[in-house]
Amino acid sequence: MEKYLVIAEEGELKLAEQLGFALTEDRKHTTNGYTLVITGVGAFNILKSLKSLPQDAEVVNIGYAGSANFDIGTIVEVTESRLNHPNVTYPEPTCELFVEKDSPYTKAVCYSGTDFILQSDYKDCVFDMELAFIAGLGFKHLRSLKHVSDNLSLHAYHELTHGVE
């Protein structure tokens, strides 16, 4: 089975390494056998970058996410992926993700949006801009780990990920 580590931006490589996905010398693979794919941020980049991967591949998505109430620095193992559309309710599938049996991380739902989420009444969850679109491609073995980078603050996100003061 082919294995892929999917991140949105090169700045997430350090996070991936902290979570056990160290890169080999060629910087295209991990020491535990995953091929690295850097997609770019957002839905269009996900679809463009991942559409040709086999659906039976093992895909691990690692990235930063916001949360209305989780502490910054919390690592979340995503249990389910949904789209974020808080103003409209309609029938829509959700995607359950693979969760490591003995995972030490906080378990939560991830809501994906097409823009940075700056406020939400949703609690005990995380927000990103990619996971629901990855899940929508139908991978049979999808796992996601998210590092809470901010409490719905674009400035705090940039401070952590780009060193902005």
Image (tube, rainbow, N blue to C red):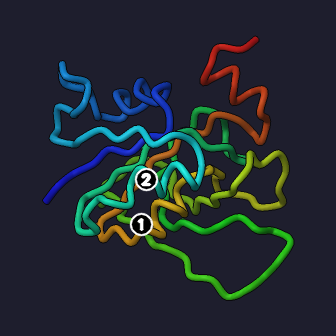
Image spot of residue 91 (x, y percent)? 67, 88
Secondary structure beneath dot 1 equals loop
Q: Residue at x 55, y 76 (%)?
A: 94
Residue at left offset 35%, top offset 64%: 98
User: Label 1 sits on what residue type?
Assistant: Leu
Q: Amino acid at mark 2?
A: Ser
Please determine whether, in this image, residue 70 is positioned above or below residue 15. below
Q: Which residue is mark 2?
A: 144
* Viewer-nearest residue: 43 or 2: 43
Quarter placement of the N terminus: bottom left
| Circle 2 residues within 10 Å: few <14, some 14–19, many ≥20 | many
Say if mark 1 contacts mark 2, CB within 8 Å. yes
Q: If you read the primary sequence from the N terminus, does the residue marked by circle 1 or circle 2 appear first?
A: 1
Compared with 74, 24 (above or below) is above
Q: Which mark is residue 19?
A: none
- The answer to whether residue 136 is left or right of residue 54 is right
Secondary element at image label 2: strand
> x, y percentage for residue 131?
52, 57
| Front in this rendered view, residue 162 or 102 | 162
Task: Point out the image quarter for the C terminus.
Answer: top right
Nearer-the-camera pick, 5 or 96: 5
**Mark 1 lies on residue:** 97
What is the number of callouts on the image? 2
